[in-house]
Image (cartoon, rainbow, N blue to C red):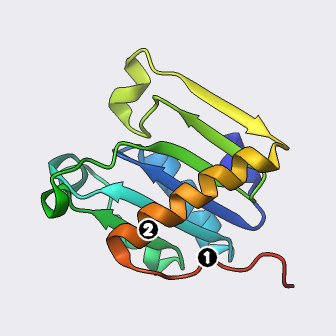
């Protein structure tokens, strides 16, 4: 949670199930601040029946990409986040209330640009596979 709050440029999240409203509210806040926030999440009963109004992310300036498992029969089961192209968060932890009581793990890696780039490439691949090409914001140009 603290890493999300420190974001100054971008937050890219690909996670199968996201039901933790506190984490979602941080994403909305960061998007509202002008941070490039993009979320890829499964479009299934868990997502549709939780207490989060995912479209709020877009209202605040972020982007939401729903992955319909019925489209391919394959579950997007990733669980990672890249912050400012520098911090990588990954592990078995879904960003859900249920994960808080499970024996889940999470790894946070900072200043490993090669690792962050690998996950960023995977984020782009997933997004393009289900939603077509749409470039991420170019953070090198100010």
Element marked by disc 1 = loop
User: Is 123 placed left or right of 78 in the picture?
Assistant: right
List x then y, in percent, for residue 128: 43, 72
Q: Is residue 45 left or right of residue 27?
A: left
Q: Which residue is mark 2?
A: 127
Query: How far apart in space, not on screen, are marks 2 and 1 (Cα)?
Result: 10 Å
Image quarter of the C terminus? bottom right
Looking at the rendered structure, the secondary structure element under dot 2 is helix
Considering only vertical position in the picture, is 105 above or below 60?
above
Say which label, 2 or 1, has the lower sequence index: 2
Say if 84 sits above or below 137 in the image. Answer: above
Tell which of 63 and 88 is nearer to you: 88
Could you classify mark 2 by the number of other residues whose Cα lies within 10 Å: few (under 14), some (14-19), or many (20 or more)? Answer: many
Can you see residue 133? yes
Q: Is residue 36 left or right of residue 113?
A: left
| Residue 71 placement (x, y as % from top left) | 16, 64
Q: Is residue 12 visible?
A: no
> Residue placed at 39% from the left, 28% from the top?
99
In this rendering, is residue 2 above or below 132?
above
């Amino acid at each position: 949670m603290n890493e999300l709050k420190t974001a100054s440029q971008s937050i890219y999240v690909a996670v199968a199930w996201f039901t933790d409203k506190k984490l979602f509210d941080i994403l909305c806040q960061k998007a509202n601040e002008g941070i490039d926030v993009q979320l890829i999440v499964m479009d299934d009963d868990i997502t549709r029946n939780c207490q989060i109004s995912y479209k709020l992310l877009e209202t605040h300036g972020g982007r939401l990409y729903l992955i319909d498992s019925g489209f391919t029969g394959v579950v997007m089961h990733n669980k990672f986040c890249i912050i400012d192209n520098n911090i990588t968060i990954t592990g078995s932890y879904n960003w859900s209330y249920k994960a808080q009581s499970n024996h889940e793990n999470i790894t946070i890696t900072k200043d490993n640009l090669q690792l962050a780039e690998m996950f960023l490439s995977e984020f782009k691949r997933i997004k393009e596979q289900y939603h077509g090409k749409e470039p991420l914001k170019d953070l090198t140009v100010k």
